[in-house]
Image: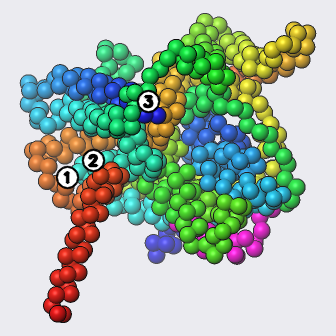
Amino acid sequence: MAILDNLASFLKAISGFVTPLALLHIAWSTLLGIVIGALPGLTATMGIALITTLTYKLPADLAILVLICVYVGAIYGGSRTAILINIPGTPANAATTLDGFPLSMQGLAGRAMGVATTGSVFGSFIGMFFLATIAPVLGNYALKFQSFEFFWLAIFGIIISGHLTALEDPIKGWIAGFLGLLVAMVGQEGIHAYERFTYGTTELLGGFALIPAMVGAFGFAEVLTVMKNPPAKLADAPKDSVFPKILDVLQYWRTIIRSGLIGTLIGIIPGVGEDIGAWVSYAAARRKSKEREKFGKGSVEGLMAAETGNNAVVPGAIIPALTLAIPGSAPAAVLLAAMFIHGLRPGPLIMVETPQFVYQVVAMVFFATLAIFMYGVGFSKLLLKVLAIPRSRLMPVVFVLCVIGSYAITNRTFDIWVMIGFGIIGFILRQMRYPMAPLVLGIILGDLMDKNLRRGLVLTDGDLAPFFTRPICLVLWLITLSSIVLSIHPLRHALKEALNILWSKIRRLMIQPVR
Amino acid sequence: MARADLITGIVLILLNLYVIIESWRMPRLEHLKVHPLSVPGIVPAFIGTVLILFGIALVSRSIKRGGYRLGFTGEQFLQVLKNPGNQRLMLTAFLTIGYAGLLIGTLPYWLATGLFIFVFILLFEWKRGISLSQHKRGIITAAVIATLSSAAITFVFERLFLVSLP
């Protein structure tokens, strides 16, 4: 019965968007998303942050529809650049270059694009299925969460996101996350309304606004990075057909399902994102593949895994954003901020207050996915023309949009300076290989962590036990601690030694009675 | 990277010592009978402490990798300045910050934006050793792109999407 109810709500939401105005918004915003994703230097996060400005005056449902279409479009669009010029259009398409570009070099660029379209469409649909089925359940379950669980969710998000986005050097991911939390401490705090770190400035009373900070960290920082790096090569038009082949789906259906599941799961983990979804799906496909030797040399299976994985993250990342107000990725963080701007209230109460909105979001992903399929089949040449725009002509326009995007939300020049400040800090941190996703997650989760730690301590009169003994808290802090311990080499080594000793003792004990 | 980590670590430690001192100085709100564990300074102090620990870890790791030994001479500094990538970066920073901080608010929005885009394109597409007359085409292209972009952005944001411009 629950499934039928879900289906009915989904169909109702679908019918709500079958209007000329909504279809027009789907058409332009998905195309814009694909172009943003395809252009090296313009990321999904930046695109959503900039387009949020355009949606201020739109009704809430159309505004979120536009942003979701940009999101889905950008993650897909990045595959074009990865295949044609070996440069990922967005970080989410880094794994796509491994097999996409070799296929292109073999004269199979069209086929590679078709595979990317197939993977992206199936990835989005798999993620969408779980968005429709998990979000309502998680939303209802989240109603049981108290301050203790929310505090650990924030810490868990920061540590796991920091770890997974900086696998080679997790400490940098954690530093970025805690710096984000520190940034969130600026402004009037939520319990006693005391002004922290404002130094008497009225502009800082509400803290740093998220959109200008994101536009800076992802937009201005990207403009600086693109202009510093050498120019990218120009792409040649594919000579073979870009139409997806049904045979690829039949041959690699296991890879598609596996990558879709992995992508969705990675999406649900706070602040991890599409790039990790693609890498993990790619690694899993390689491990399980019968044609492992082809990976990295133009494997259709590898390309399929990467593109299915990254697009499945999109609906996956929206699940915690809707039900817990904790974004699963950096673009989902901007989407979450946009939802608040439009008066929507994502969080544990969503299934109580506005359950239909969850299904509207599912329908939005559905339409965006249909749109990327149509554009994937029909607009390849237009995209090549866009890719030929020199950066010296594109980047000043992008910066102009960064300025408007920061200013328009509250009409304050101060926010333009916030954008510039975060842009410069973001650029420096990126040059030193600090990931941006945990920083953004920290800014979003700062208030949640602050209120819930203090509230929890007051509720227990300073007793820390519930923070560690409640079942969900126990799971969250154990995973968090394991993530830290396993990343510190001496601790990992000591743990391994201790486990070895323990194991040999157990074996000896088991063998002795036989003797 | 070892030297960058050393500097970052030291900055983190100093910044967060300041954060902890500021957190300590925040009011305890005793007159409101506020619970001592819900005072405003407790969470910033917690974050500051964690970041100091991370800072110490970065510094000690960097020292082990010889980060403190890597000196920085005047010649190296000149090389950094001469690097084409860094030159492009500095020019971009100068133009963008100049536009956002100086032109916006001083000139009408459409004019400031058009001027910024025109100068940006012109400077980055300018080729040395070519006479001014040979740059005529480039100048006209930059002017056309700047005019069209400025007009389109102003129209789309202000008239179509009703967004107020700076």
Residue holding disc 3: B4
Q: Secondary structure at mark 1?
A: helix
In the image, is residue A302 part of the stretch drawn in magenta?
Answer: no
Chain holding disc 3: B
Q: Amino acid at mark 3?
A: Ala
Mark pair 1, 3: CA separation: 37 Å
Question: Residue at the spot x=46%, y=75% of the render?
Answer: A1
As drawn, B47 above or below A111: above
As drawn, A172 above or below A275: above
Residue holding disc 1: A467
Q: Secondary structure at mark 3?
A: helix
The answer to whether residue A462 shows anywhere in this view is yes
Magenta span: chief secondary structure: helix
Q: Amino acid at mark 2?
A: Phe
Q: Amino acid at mark 1?
A: Phe
- Residue A177 at x, y percent in the picture: 38, 40
Marker count (numbered): 3
Chain holding disc 1: A
Q: Residue A151 got which mark? A: 2
What residue span does the magenta drawing correspond to?
A242-261
